[in-house]
């Protein structure tokens, strides 16, 4: 199975239902593929490369289903949080503001670790 990267993206409110349903349909289709493939597993091939290949494919597809359902769940959770807030403009700027402030504090702490105006302190490179 290929490497995966988590991303965040926005979806228009009107596209939430179709997007979630698309993810669910993809999971259902993959599940149908697994079921179809599993119907052809033969006991006489249990300890063979053929069985190993089939089991690897089934496990990879189960992981794909889990990713699709996880993405659908995340979208639903985000939508439910949005619905709880009522006003979309109320929640987002505060979150962005908090994240920006936290990031700024981290940047300042990082700078302070390497640039100390007090000459009585050790050279920053000596600390490393």
Image: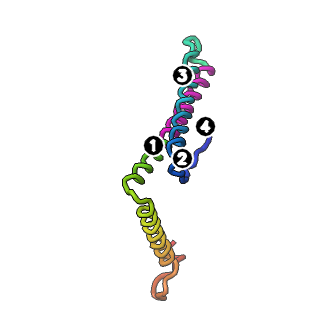
Q: Which residues are magenta?
A: 49-70
Work out how far the residue at label 3 is from the one at label 4, CA to CA, in angstroms: 19 Å
Work out how far the residue at label 3 is from the one at label 1, CA to CA, in angstroms: 23 Å
Q: Is residue 109 above or below residue 86?
A: below
Q: Give residue 73's mark.
A: 1
Q: Which comes before the other along the chain, label 2 or label 3?
A: 2
| Residue pointed to by mark 2 | 15
Residue 8 percent coordinates (x, y): 54, 53
Q: Residue, x 54% and y 46% (percent of image)? A: 15
| Residue pointed to by mark 3 | 35
Q: Which comes before the other along the chain, label 1 or label 4?
A: 4
Q: Residue, x 43% and y 67% (percent of image)? A: 98
Prevalent SS, magenta region: helix
- Quarter assignment of residue 49: top right
Q: Residue, x 58% and y 45% (percent of image)? A: 4
Mark 1 touches mark 4? (CB < 8 Å) = no
């Amino acid at each position: 199975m290929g490497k995966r990267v988590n991303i965040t993206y926005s979806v228009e409110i009107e596209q939430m239902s179709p997007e979630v349903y698309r993810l669910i349909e993809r999971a259902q289709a993959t599940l149908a593929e697994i079921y179809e493939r599993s119907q052809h597993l033969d006991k006489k091939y249990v300890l063979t490369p053929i069985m190993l290949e089939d089991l690897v494919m089934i496990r990879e597809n189960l992981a794909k289903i889990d990713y699709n359902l996880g993405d659908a769940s995340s979208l639903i959770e985000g939508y439910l949080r949005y619905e709880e807030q009522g006003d979309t403009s109320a929640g987002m700027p505060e979150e962005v503001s908090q994240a920006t402030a936290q990031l700024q504090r981290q940047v300042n702490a990082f700078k302070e670790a390497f640039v100390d105006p007090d000459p009585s302190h050790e050279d920053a490179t000596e600390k490393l």
